[in-house]
Image: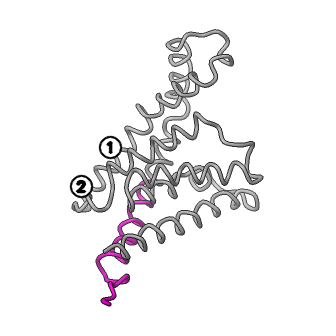
Amino acid sequence: MIKKQVTLVSVSFVTAAAISVGTAYLPVYFAVPRILYANIIPTALTAVVCGPLYGAAYALINSFILNSIGMGSGVIVNVLLYQMLEAALIGLFFHTKHAKKTYAAIIVYILLFSAFDATLLKAFSYILYYTFHVNMTAGKSLMDYLAYNYSFYLKSGITANFIVVLFSLTAAVMAGRFIFWLCMEKGGCRETKL
């Protein structure tokens, strides 16, 4: 069983890393829509297959690698914490071991979590930004800052964010179920008796 778990974690991390590299470099060479370069598929995939702690760990590792090796200007703490929280919640909600549900139930869960992510969880990202960058908020209180930015987000960005999260979760859950089936149920990682 341990060999299967190690293989499961390894396969999900390698698959997620390949997707991360693709989504990081694809926009450099091609004009791609936001749904392809701003997705959360790699982190969500790891969280779905391995659980909330692995998803948060992958978000941490991915952020450090992509933002420290020429892809960005270093790790942004409030963004990292938001990504780790999002991954942990996805892992709690969709972890494959606990998600032996019908496809209809999974579709409902994906829609509900996408709506939750695009509305309530997004507000938390503004709170994190304010916490770490209070000196850049023009002296506004937390409630004023949140009311102004979140209301603007609700008017202009919520639909795009909902679509990106919906697409990402759908792809991650489908890929996660396939990886779980391949490694755990099909017997692709068979135990060897000594």
| Comes first in the chain, label 1 or label 2 | 2
How packed mark 2 is, by other alpha carbons closer than 10 Å (few <14, some 14-19, many 20 or more), is few
Residue 94 percent location from the top left of the image: 33, 54
91 and 153: which one is in front?
91
Q: Residues within 10 Å of mark 1 (few under 14, many from 20)?
A: few
Residue 175 is one of the magenta-drawn residues: yes
Majority SS type along the magenta span: helix
Residue type, label 2: Ala
Q: Which residue is mark 1?
A: 112
Quarter of the image for residue 180 reads: bottom left
Q: Amino acid at mark 1?
A: Leu
| Residue at figure coordinates x 62%, y 18% from the top left | 134
Q: CA distance from mark 1 to mark 2?
A: 10 Å
In this picture the colour scheme is one colour
Find disc 2 in the rendering and name its residue: 105
Contact between labelled residues 2 and 1, with CB atoms less than 8 Å apart: no
Circle 1 SS class: helix
Compared with 128, 118 (above or below) is: below
Q: Secondary structure at mark 2?
A: helix
Q: Residue furthest bottom?
A: 194
* 74 inside magenta stretch: no
In the image: residue 17, left or right of residue 3? right
Q: Which residues are magenta?
A: 169-194
Q: Is residue 115 above or below residue 58?
A: above
Residue drawn at the location 48% of the way across and 47% of the way down? 163
Q: Position of residue 13 (x, y in %)?
A: 51, 65
Task: Determine the residue positioned at 37% across, 38% down.
Answer: 116
- Mark on residue 21? none
Horizontal and vertical percent position of residue 120? 40, 31
- Decide: is 149 above or below 76: above
Front-most of 66 and 31?
66
Where is residue 80? Give x, y as percent. 57, 41
